[in-house]
Image: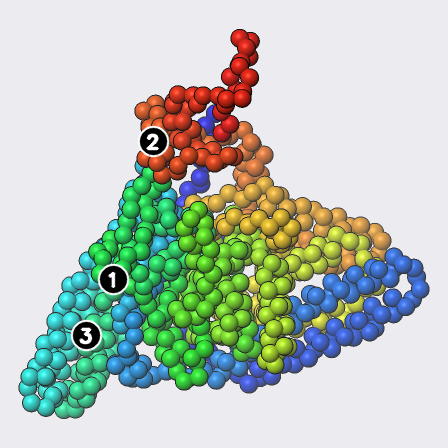
Amino acid sequence: MGRIDRQPSSRRAQWGSERTRTPLDTVHRTPSEMKIIWGRVAIIVTIAAWVGYLVFTVVPRILSGEGVLATLEAILYGLVVTFLSFSALMYLVARSGAFGRFRDHARIPRGELDRHFAHRAGSGMTVLVPSYAEETSVIRKTMWSAALQEYPDLRVVLLLDDPPTPADPAVRARLEETRGIAAEIATALEMPRARFAENLFALEHRWILGPDPVVDAEALEHLVADYDLASQWLRDMAGTWPHEDHVDTFFIDQVLRELASDLDLTAQALALAAADGDTPTVAHVRDMRRRLVRIFTAELTTFERKQYASLSHEPNKAMNLNSYIGLMGGRYREEHGPGGTLLRPVAGSTSADLIVPNADYLLTLDADSLLLRDYCIRLVYFLEQPGNERVAVTQTPYSSFRGAPTRIERLAGASTDIQHILHQGMTAHGATFWVGANAVIRMEALDDILEIDTVDGFEVRRYVQDRTVIEDTESSIDIADRGWTLANYPERLSYSATPPDFGSLVVQRRRWANGGLLILPKFWRFARSRHRSGRSVSLAEWMLRTNYMASLAWASFGLILMLTLPFDSRLLSPLVVFAALPYFLAQASDLKYCGYRRIDIFRIYGFNLILLPVNLAGVLKSIEQALTGRKIPFARTPKVKDRTATQLLYVAAPWAIIAFSVYTTWWNAQSENWGTAAFAAFNAVTALWATLENIGLRASVADTWLGLTDWMWVDARPKASAAASEAAEVDWREVLYRGYPASGESHRAVASVRDALPAAPPPADAEPATSDEQTPEVVR
């Protein structure tokens, strides 16, 4: 029986979803002194309440002599409170560092950026956009936001990881459209690029051949006209861009129209200068003309590693990036053989089929992320300032698109914007982690962490680790171990999509929860190595990094213990509330700071409750990998227009949490354990609220039914033709390529030809076979 794909219709805006589509300010609002002071007070209160809880509640229970079980219960509850309080404390420490950075940050003026890049020499930047089965409309916006970056010698490469020859006609059509995006953008940019490059050449040619160069009225008038033309070209493009969702709104308003407004402002300033009879300097005019050329000049191309048998086909983003990075700076000849197309390096004087330029910097950009107009020049300017020579990675932790049409996307966006603040604060303490959605990376630093393996006779270069599914986190430790640092740039210059439904969110959060425990020992080895060298890791960095990698594990197990075990209500002291209260108040304040409502703190609490089984599953996968040594498959987050169905476990678990919390409330109320009963009732209400808002009753029923009946369906496989089967079985090219199989090796094409050959004569000392014996089969 063939399986029928059942997909709901496209998403519509839900009741309670976000209405405003205006993004947060690029430059963070300066926090008040009182906000910073109260943040420090919150840290002190959390520590004092935790110490008080241990001294006045846990220790007396241990010393009470009520028995071993009471002592173990007190110790266990004290450990749970300690770990949860530690995570709350790290939140407060990180946000305090972030607000200090926001207060001290001063934006670099436009003129300084122009001067820095006016005569800068270098091999440019390569933007790598890894993509797998993304919607073409999503990729197109991302590629445009990268192509319009104002950066000299910019190369944008779409790393397409889809299967190169899909059987499904719809998938094949989408793939062909995706392959054409780079050429489509390059063609669209050609007209403005050619005009602005020609006008720059004409001006410089006139200045070189004439007397002393001077900015006359004609030169200024032509410059204003070109800026007006560029602005109008962008506005025309914005006016014709398909407007389907809130991400399109962002792209049109913040990428296209904001860049047009920037150019408009320059044109108006130049017109005012002409009206006043004043003119910019020759150098300034040259820089402004070069800026126009840079904005509309980019080399765009597409690369598909799966078309080459000599490159890794491991199904994860890290190896998609590594495959291309490993080719950079080289020239290659294509060899076509039975195993597929191979890339062979060739010398500089030999003709090549593929030439991959090198670059000083790489920009890794997820296919569903967008960059604001001056992302590249501001981050590279930062890297090239004195004192930043050993900064390997800089990034702006991505923010969320506003105007999400679903409640869960809005809530996931709120969590994303809170995480942006925390990542900024981690930089204040030297604990930055590379966040893989976007980052500018020095190629020199990647060369420092390069690992070279040989797989199937081919060299495999690993710059970004793929041992875990959170490749950016482990690579951050590798980079720091080589003496480099990482830094978050304190502005909002990048945005990325958040999962639109519970099913896709499950995939993302399960991946995020998987891998931190595996990386933690590597960080501890790094910390010991630094200590032995006399450059100890600071206590703040040690705590923040440990919390970042392991908090999901201890929080998941801790919350399960608090939800399920019938602890003595005397352990639920008011001091526990005082230890947690600063965290919740601070997070509510941060939600307001990010444009959300303070009441969303209750939504996020319930949201985290129903995600508890998802986080726990990711943690258990890490433990499984540690025990077995087998890598966990990389699961890409679906971001599609239709809803992603949820696995039975993850749709049933929230309702089980609600039911158990209701039962715990009733049972503790009967036993007059009022503290535990109140806690369970609060969990029941918030979990029910989160489940109804973010999963929904109808989706819960549909996904439960689908999970219960899923075993009845099997995927239909296309039948190969007889001719194709015969060709696959007997391929002389494959035989010549593979050679004679060794003992224990098996290959269908080799075996089919070998079996067609005359049987080899038996050994001289073999006994003759009798009539009732069968000739033994050749061992394969």
Locate residue 570: give its quadrant: bottom right
Dot in front, 3 or 2: 2
Question: Is 274 above or below relative to 530?
Answer: below
Residue extending furthest toward the right:
65
Q: Secondary structure at mark 2?
A: loop
Residue extending furthest toward the top:
771
Residue pictured at 66% horizontal, 60% vertical? 555
Q: Amino acid at mark 1?
A: Gly
The residue that mark 1 highlights is 348
The residue that mark 2 highlights is 731
The residue that mark 3 highlights is 227
Residue extending furthest toward the left:
210
Observer-nearest of 611 and 204: 204
Image coords of residue 465 (percent x, y): 49, 59
Locate residue 123: give its quadrant: bottom left
Image coords of residue 107 (percent x, y): 39, 82
Mark 2 and mark 1: Cα distance apart in space: 35 Å
